[in-house]
């Protein structure tokens, strides 16, 4: 099926302020500061030497290419990312930007009365406030408002035009449409892909054409690519924390159920690598093809193995059928994950208690009980009132779109090499979930991570938080894309530290 290539933002005119977003100027590093700093290294890197590169802007809008699945197996995720991108572009074209720069998160630590337990939430209300405030403690506060005036509508005097054909959850379509966006549409940036297989199908095309590419998805980690920026969470930000929590609270015997493609395989490899470091063991492991929707055999194997808990890396609409089937079969083991419920909102789609005792480490969930997030939810649902759930990857797409606009404004041009230099400046933003920053060396975001537990009524409690986890793993392997461009993906088996530790345990 052929889709219309052009799907522009609905409105580009100035509107009333989005819930009193304020009129203060955009914070952080200015373009003048960036140009001064970049000029110091211009002779060495040959990027900013020519004034025409910095000042030259072609006529017409900035062309923004988007490839997210709006049909097929991954549409449930792609539609949310498509909406997040549209909301961000609407705000940018109307003169708003995320607060931020190179400075880091702001807000005071204050003494306050705190409740004895975390609050429990669903997407409609606070179910349990955690009990009456009972003791004094130091708490972190952040501004509820994350948007500030940019000083212009659009970027550099140009509106941003969204060009977003539907790749239909098909890797071949991704490749064909990526070439079309680059060669025919001549877009300035591409944001694309839910599944890691989709990303890897098009990343060589991006590199061949030196296309600036954002992958806005939680994934298995390891991509080190000069042209690619990854804004979703990675294993050191999700898998390691959830494993620590689950082992401490439920025990050391792990059974992994994973999708049978690179995301599931490499996430399972992370679990195997980390288990001995955490005094645990993987006692069973299955890889499920994406087409599978019946799980009676897997459920029987899990019941026989009697693990302490399950590590879940299944994904897509077919795989989500595991949860009601497992519940019907009486499977009661606790579950941990880096994806489910935060991505595919299974706790909203299936009747309770199918997701009871489910735990996920997430960079975003709609239930986050902060004033900032409630403001974000209000703005999103004003534009998309029928959204079934605001998921983790929609937030990543929203943040990435604002981050790109901020980098273009900082660079003073849409020239891809210069924008990459701006993205490598240490830039960060006040995202709805909390402060995030782009690591120059790895091209991955630091993340504000929360561990969410789903109860028998499918309400959510955030058990613990990590306000700033850096993407440290590929740095440990020596990756520094500022100094040495690379174009590959590392895997856990290449990490000598993991190998060394596993040898000691055998």
Image (spheres, rainbow, N blue to C red):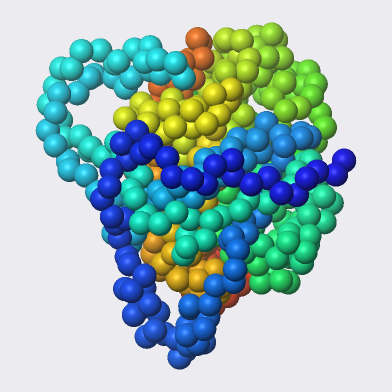
Would residue 412 be found to the left or right of residue 347 on screen?
left
Residue reaching furthest to the right: 1
Task: Tell me the quarter of the picture where residue 214 sits.
Answer: bottom right
Would residue 418 be found to the left or right of residue 350 on screen?
left
Q: State the residue at coordinates (34%, 43%).
A: 146
Task: Tell me the quarter of the picture where residue 344 sits.
Answer: top right
Tell me if residue 58 can be seen: yes
Which residue is nearer to you in this view: 141 or 8?
8
Residue reaching furthest to the front: 13
Q: Picture coordinates of residue 338 (x, y %)?
A: 55, 37
Residue reaching furthest to the bottom: 43
Q: State the residue at coordinates (59%, 40%).
A: 10
Q: State the residue at coordinates (68%, 51%).
A: 163
Image quarter in which the N terminus is found: top right
Tell me if residue 287 can be seen: no
Is the residue 308 above or below the residue 128 in the image? below
Q: Picture coordinates of residue 384 (x, y %)?
A: 55, 29
How many numbered discs, if any? 0
Which residue is nearer to you in this view: 497 or 291?
291
Q: Picture coordinates of residue 376 (x, y %)?
A: 41, 34
Task: Tell me the quarter of the picture where residue 21 sits.
Answer: top left
Is the residue 433 above or below the residue 55 in the image? above
Q: State the residue at coordinates (50%, 87%).
A: 50
């Amino acid at each position: 099926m052929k889709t219309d290539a052009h799907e522009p933002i609905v409105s580009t005119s100035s509107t009333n302020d989005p819930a009193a977003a304020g009129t203060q100027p955009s914070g952080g590093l200015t373009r003048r500061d960036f140009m001064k700093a970049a000029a110091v290294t211009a002779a060495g890197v040959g990027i900013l030497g020519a004034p025409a590169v910095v000042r030259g802007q072609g006529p017409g809008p900035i062309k923004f290419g988007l490839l997210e699945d709006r049909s097929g197996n991954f549409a449930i995720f792609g539609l949310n990312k498509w909406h997040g991108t549209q909301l961000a572009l609407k705000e940018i074209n109307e003169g708003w930007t995320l607060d931020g720069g190179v400075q880091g998160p702001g807000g005071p630590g204050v003494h306050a009365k705190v409740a004895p337990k975390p609050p429990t939430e669903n997407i409609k209300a606070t179910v349990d406030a955690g009990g009456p405030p009972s003791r004094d403690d130091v708490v972190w506060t952040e501004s509820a408002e994350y948007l500030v005036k940019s000083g212009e509508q659009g970027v550099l005097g140009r509106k941003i035009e969204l060009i977003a054909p539907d790749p239909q959850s098909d890797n071949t379509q991704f490749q064909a449409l990526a070439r079309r966006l680059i060669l025919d549409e001549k877009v300035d940036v591409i944001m694309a892909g839910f599944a890691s297989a989709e990303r890897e199908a098009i990343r060589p095309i991006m590199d061949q054409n030196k296309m600036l590419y954002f992958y806005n998805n939680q994934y298995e980690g390891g991509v080190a690519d000069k042209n690619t920026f990854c804004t979703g969470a990675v294993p050191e930000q999700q898998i390691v924390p959830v494993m620590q929590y689950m082992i401490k609270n439920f025990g050391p015997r792990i059974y992994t159920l994973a999708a049978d493609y690179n995301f599931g395989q490499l996430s399972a490899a992370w679990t195997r690598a980390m288990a001995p470091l955490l005094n645990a063991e993987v006692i069973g492991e299955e890889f499920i093809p994406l087409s599978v929707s019946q799980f009676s055999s897997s459920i029987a194997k899990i019941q026989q193995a009697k693990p302490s808990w399950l590590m879940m890396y299944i994904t897509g609409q077919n795989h989500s059928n595991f949860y009601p089937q497992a519940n019907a079969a009486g499977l009661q083991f606790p579950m941990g994950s880096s994806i489910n419920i935060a991505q595919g909102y299974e706790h909203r789609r299936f009747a309770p208690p199918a997701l009871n005792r489910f735990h996920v480490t997430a960079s975003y969930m709609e239930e986050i009980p902060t004033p900032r997030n409630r403001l974000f939810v209000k703005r999103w649902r004003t534009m998309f009132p029928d959204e079934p759930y605001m998921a983790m990857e929609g937030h990543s797409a929203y943040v990435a779109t604002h981050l790109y606009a901020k980098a273009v404004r900082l660079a003073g041009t849409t020239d891809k090499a210069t924008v990459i230099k701006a993205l490598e400046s240490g830039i960060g933003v006040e995202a709805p979930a909390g402060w995030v920053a782009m690591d120059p060396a790895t091209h991955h975001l630091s993340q504000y991570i929360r561990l969410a537990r789903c109860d028998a009524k499918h309400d959510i409690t955030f058990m613990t938080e990590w306000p700033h986890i850096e993407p440290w793993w590929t740095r440990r392997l020596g990756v520094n894309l500022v100094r040495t461009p690379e174009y590959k993906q590392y895997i856990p088996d290449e990490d000598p530290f993991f190998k060394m530790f596993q040898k000691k345990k055998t």
